[in-house]
Image: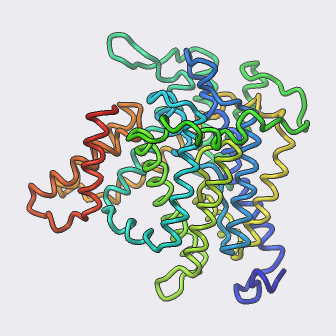
Amino acid sequence: MKKFFGFDELDTNFKREVIGGLTTFLSMAYILAVNPSILSLQGIEGVPDDMKMDINAVFVATCLAAFVGCLFMGIIAKYPIALAPGMGLNAFFAFTVVLTMGIPWQTALTGVLFSGVVFVILTLTGLREYIINAIPMEMKMAVSAGIGFFITFVGLQSSGIIAGDEATLISLGNVQSGGVLLTFAGLVITVILMTKKVPAAIFVGMIATAVLGIVTGIVPMPSAVVGSVPSVAPTFGAALEGLMDFEAIFNVQFMIVVLTFLFVDFFDTAGTLVGVASQANLIKDNKLPRASKALLADAFATITGAIFGTSTTTSYVESTAGVAAGARSGFASVVTGVLFLAAIFFSPLIVTFTSEVTAPALIIVGILMASNLSKITWGRFEVAVPAFLTVFMMPLTYSIATGIAIGFIFYPITMLMAGKRKEVHPIMYGLFIVFILYFLFIN
């Protein structure tokens, strides 16, 4: 094992890798509660049951997708990078594709499956670098920050902090209600932990909020801590069933869905790989060794996750916590994966992670993602306009895809008017046309 993972080359050992893998797991374990909550549209009123995914099946799918993804990354690419269903991508899946577009969640899973297959093809053909370079950095950062704002808005809404209002569309909710007070308390706890740089602060904050909710009677008491594994049958294989509905998948709307899944996962993975590898000093001669294997591992994990029944599985930047704790090899990812698999037996606890408990995690993740705003050159008006519209329109239209579409329509326009047409890649003009068609015929 030491030879396979290159312990001696990387100056690491079994103990450091186990500690690193455990640290990464604790840093991202919040997804075990947040992902089922989002995909089941928990806390969203007036939604028909057939639009909601089974929360217990999604929990199992989340555990299995993370387990398989971590194994792929650890054994194939040999990087200390963990994978799980991605934040932002799950919000796009639930609130844009299913809730706003009205696409059945089964067909949405087919879209995730398609994006994974396309990702594999792009990686094997070498087109991935070409596409990455085609999208300007400012727009990549705008998309990431916009998703952060959207996730925060979802957390505020699902917890009741933000409520609907006939006169102003939205307003402050009932701050005297138990659920809202619990969310505020959880947010304060998590902010303090984050400020103090406590390891796994988001996860610890969520546990503390759940305990406080149980003590105050706002959150139900779990019937047990450990229990039998829930059935994954309600979601397993649904992505493959969607392949039979040709009318649902051969249209512009479905193409937009697949492109968005692919786009966000593509750049999220690339950024995470570079960031984690840099911290672990794994980049050689300004190049990332085994980059194609890492991207393939991510793509295979997305395909597997879609079949189990969850949104896009992607690399997690929380892996940097494990690297800081000493992780350097793929064995740390294997450890993280095994812990995700073990978590499958703790399904009775899922009832305690209500929307009020998970909302602080959504808000904090949104804040972290919004930091990408600092990487946008706001002094260049031709860049500021499409970037601002991308960020602003995501929460206002309750659609990640719409925010991306509007921003990518305005980018070629402002750049052309600024006399900088040569700086616009041909792919951006192609996306301009695609998104114009999206608004004309679909939206």
Task: Please tell me in which quadrant of the rendered image residue 421 appears.
Answer: bottom left
Tell me the residue at 41%/40% (across/down). Answer: 251
Instruction: Give whichever of 364, 127 is nearer the camera.
Output: 127
Q: Position of residue 283 (x, y in %)?
A: 54, 81
Q: Give coordinates of residue 440: x percent, y percent.
A: 26, 34
The relative height of residue 135 versus residue 65 in the rendered view (above or below) is below
The residue at the point 89 percent across, 26 percent down is: 223
Direction from residue 40 to residue 118 in the image, left or right: left
Picture colour scheme: rainbow
Image quadrant holding the N terminus, namely: bottom right
* Pick the front one: 204 or 56: 56
Would you place residue 307 above or below residue 317 in this image? above
Residue 395: percent from left, percent from top: 39, 34
Quarter of the view holding residue 273: bottom right
Instruction: Place residue 138 in its image quadrant.
Output: bottom left
Q: Is residue 46 depicted above or below 85 in this figure?
A: above
Q: Nearer the viewer, residue 172 or 122?
A: 122
Asked whether, in this view, residue 369 is left or right of residue 443, the answer is right
